[in-house]
Amino acid sequence: MAIFHCQTKPISRSGGRSAVAASAYRAGVELTDERTGIVHDFTRRSGVESADLLLPEGAPDLDRGSLWNQAEAAEGRKDARTAREWVTALPSELGPDERRALALEFAGALVERYGVAVDVAIHAPGRRGDDRNHHAHLLTTTRQVGPEGLSEKAEIELSDKARVVRGLMPARKEIEAVRALWAGLANEHLERASRSERIDHRSLKAQGIEREPTKHLGPAATAIERANKQSRLRADHQEAAAFKQASAAELATEAKTVSAELAALLEHRTALERQQVEQAARQARHRAEVAAIIERQARGPEAPTAPAIEQPKARAPIRDQAKTPEPPTGRPRNVGKQDPEAVYAALLKPIREREQRAAAATLAGLGQERQQWSQARQAHQADKPGMVRLPGSLAKWERAGDALDAAGRDLARWEGAAARSADPKALEAGAVAELRRVAPGVVEAADQARKERQAREQEARRAEYEKAKIGKDFNSMAVGREGRMFGYTDRAEKWQALPAELKEKIENYNRLPKEQRPKELERITKDQATVELLGQAREISRSQGRGR
């Protein structure tokens, strides 16, 4: 079965590699590196089926040794890239000549696309490996090859910043385009050979295939399995794949349940919002009625056609119980002398009582809803610990309940103040102003509480992120030092530039048993001195990057 494999990686001096040595090994020939004087002799190696060198049109006639020695001489940096390698799996369904034709066509496409020289070597499967593992190594120069020899850097070697300036797509997408080119060429050759097999450069997810991708074991694990032993790496991969599949199925089921719950919550919220809108409309009508009654009471029966509102009689002193004669029709009444308690009892109290009953019913209903939501959320978290909580549900009802509590207190205070008022005009003005003030105040208080809570949550998330970043940076340095990775060896510039105290902490951390390290790492993230040392290390790393 034909498989897709097309990977690329640079040949760089920073890894101790040489383009001359890479070409000699892949082609199975002897080449001398003129820069170092080392002779690389691989004439005894087996498995090289063919080796070809392709040059752009108009380029000078160069042999393999001259080309790669010029590629080494063209670079002056100690960490320069001197070549790029493409490794492709050749379909075992094709014959030897067909595989060679496919590899050379792909090499020609690279020559035309980038203007570079391509050294193509086709290797046969290993003697103890899979007998279908026919593959090709294509070694390309990092510079274009013209009539004068090697010139400027090829486009694929440019940084993304330089590529944007030239109007090119990022290097990641460029490599993806070359992978697609290889898949297309391979499928064309399979079709010419009347084979039904096809390869696809896309991921399994992009192809709509629901299975875990296989992982490359590497040379060490492969050698163990060739000795008829099962490598621990393969067992780990298989166990991880099985766990991932089971987790995916469980998450899919959980996602459906949560989606159904969210749909029910949204429907319930829509119904509640509709009720709140209707309640607000009723309250607005009540306020309008109060304002109209107060205004008519203040004007008095000026027009004969206007319906007069019966005014309660002012309470006279006990010593004078005689009735005061009514003023003539059409003459304004003297509202400034009337008892404010009587005005309140006759005009405002019935409407206020209706509003208070409606607010009390709404408050009781929301309190019951809030309790139900709280119980539902607690049951949900107990049944499914670790799941994301329902979005803002309980907080919404807490805000609504708090707002209505505050509104009820405001209305009670206003009622008491109105009853104690000695001036009916002040009573009227206070009633209208208070009715207009209550609703915006409730909304503003709830909004302010929400903003303050969001600010606290954002600050907590930022602190948690900083703590995690400190632990991640320290652990990354410790892992690099423990494995003596690039940049963390004794003579590495990056390691030597770190503060002495930080290096000592890293060394002490790596001496601890692995089961004690998480606890020590937690302590380190809280140590202010270590945090400052890590900040100095990041600044040193940035300055080194700018220096290059």
Image (cartoon, grey):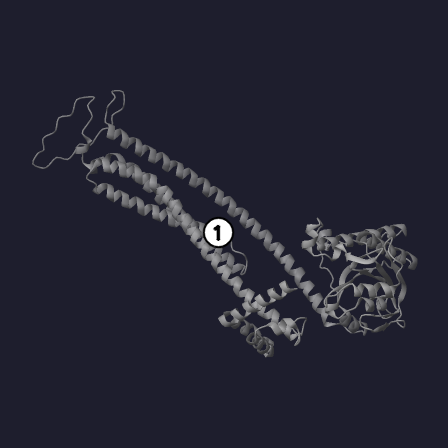
Circle 1 is placed at which residue position? 392
Q: Is residue 261 above or below residue 322?
A: below
Residue at 27 percent of width and 37 percent of height: 429
Front-lying residue, 188 or 470: 470
Nearest the eye: 217 or 241: 217
Is 167 positioned to the left or the right of 65 in the image?
Answer: left
Residue 512 x %, y %: 58, 78
Q: Position of residue 259 (x, y in %)?
A: 57, 50
Q: In which quarter of the view is residue 340 placed?
A: top left
Give percent across and percent down for residue 101. 89, 55
At mark 1, the secondary structure is: loop
Position of 124 compared to 153: left or right? right
Please state which of residues 302 and 156 is positioned toward the viewer in this rendering: 156
Residue 113 percent location from the top left of the image: 80, 52
Observer able to see residue 133? no
What type is the residue that disc 1 sits on? Gly
Q: Residue at x 61, y 71 (%)?
A: 477
Picture quadrant where residue 311 is located = top left
- Residue sitting at the far top: 304
